[in-house]
Amino acid sequence: MKQPLAYRMRPVHIDEVIGQSHLVGENKIIRRMVDAKMLSSMILYGPPGIGKTSIASAIAGSTHSAFRQLNAATDTKKDLQIVVEEAKFSGQVILLLDEVHRLDKPKQDFLLPHLESGQVILIGATTENPYISISPAIRSRTQIFELKSLTTQDVILALERAIADEKRGLGKEKIVIDEDALLHFARSTMGDVRGSLNALELAALSTKPDADGTIHITLDIAEECVQKKALVHDKNGDAHYDVISAFQKSIRGSDVDAAMHYLARLLEAGELLIACRRLMVCAYEDIGLGNPQAVARTVLAVQAAEKLGLPEARIPLANAVVDLALSPKSNSAYLALDSALADVRAGKSGDIPDSLRDAHYSGANKLGRGIGYQYPHDFPDHWIKQQYLPDSLKNRRYYEPAATGKYEQALANQLQHRFNKDS
């Protein structure tokens, strides 16, 4: 039986790995291991389809090592024993263990001494945070590397390689693919190169050649094979970023219907991660102290969406969009910080008042540190007038309340009360 395209296109050398330049690029850690042929066990973690198996395959191919692949959840201790026996015979085996976070204790206890001896080089693959999900015994014997999400251009490169490769890919077929179809394959799977390659192969195998034997893959065909509609875009992808921009600006402008429309376009294009990130930015940048409860609810909605995944993720995100779009808006907090940053970067700092300086060490009193500081909790309203800013900035005001919502109105009243008592 012919293996799927994504399987056939696995790298056989470290130079063929797409993306992950922070690990396999020139003079980077995994590249140095391979070049020196000094391999150690490792955990690779990140989203599905971004190169964990590819890196393991490439390491094995580049070092001419025996390579075996098992699944920690479904394969048995006996399967591990077979790999260990092979390692004893050949000297060393690279074992890619998928879902390594699901390795149970009996399998783990069996494997540990062989990791320590170096006969088995474990490359554990997981989508879970290994610092939380993997036992300390395994973590202490491995190096942990986080893989980064592939860019659209990374996935396009993988697709183009597969189309051109006559030995492992589709190069023997006469394929013409429209640019928007290629971009749709790359974008719609959210950086999952395995999913993109498999969708491409489905398109190639299911499209009837024309009279001269050409297989012409259009955007309509790509959409059918991926089962996701394309986000409207142009050659340079400008419209893609226009949608993201319009999404935030619609929330900022309190147009809930427009915001919902742009969220729908992002989700239909498979851009769940981008939608979540942009909602978090909107919450803190545009709503902020205008409605802190809505900000907190948005954080919870994003966490729920990330755990649920699409299509259910749309439900908490829809709630968050309505909440943020119709909330009172305020950007006063981050503008205050930006104003303070501008002063610091311009060299406007000055000496910290002696009364505020650290006074816990011996001799601080002789230097005048902490003398004169008044503990606010000892006074009515837990407040007492004293200087906190340096002399050169003592009358500087950074925070200017927007007072668009009840919460920030209360903050503004409190601030004014302090100023009235201060004057």
Image (spheres, rainbow, N blue to C red):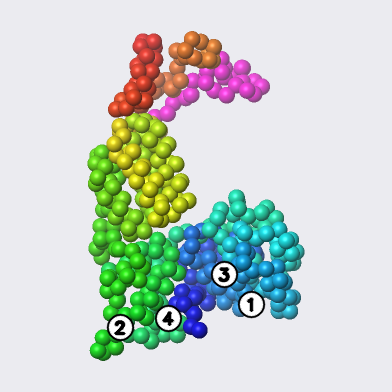
The image's mark for residue 169 is 4
Q: Which residues are magenta?
A: 347-371
The image's mark for residue 393 is none
Q: Residue at x 64, y 66 (%)?
A: 122
Q: Provide the secondary structure element on which disc 3 rests.
A: helix
Tell me which corner region of the image, top left, top right, bottom left or bottom right, holds residue 185.
bottom left
Residue under numbered circle 1: 66
- Mark before the other along the chain sequence, 4 or 1: 1
Residues at marks 4 and 1, CA–CA distance in whole angstroms: 24 Å
Residues at marks 1 and 2, CA–CA distance in whole angstroms: 40 Å
- Mark before the other along the chain sequence, 3 or 1: 3
Q: Provide the secondary structure element on which disc 4 rests.
A: loop
Please tell me how crowded label 4 is: few (under 14), some (14-19), or many (20+) other residues with Cα within 10 Å: many
Q: Residue at x 63, y 23 (%)?
A: 360
Residues at marks 2 and 3, CA–CA distance in whole angstroms: 36 Å
- Asked if residue 307 lies left or right of residue 106, the reply is left
Q: Amino acid at mark 4?
A: Gly
Q: Amino acid at mark 3?
A: Ala
CB under 8 Å between discs 3 and 4: no
**Which quadrant is the C terminus positioned in?**
top left
Residue under numbered circle 3: 56
- From the image, give the main secondary structure of the stretch colored magenta: loop
CB under 8 Å between discs 1 and 2: no
Q: Amino acid at mark 2?
A: Lys
Residues at marks 3 and 1, CA–CA distance in whole angstroms: 11 Å
Residue under numbered circle 2: 208
Residues at marks 3 and 4, CA–CA distance in whole angstroms: 20 Å
Q: Provide the secondary structure element on which disc 1 rests.
A: strand
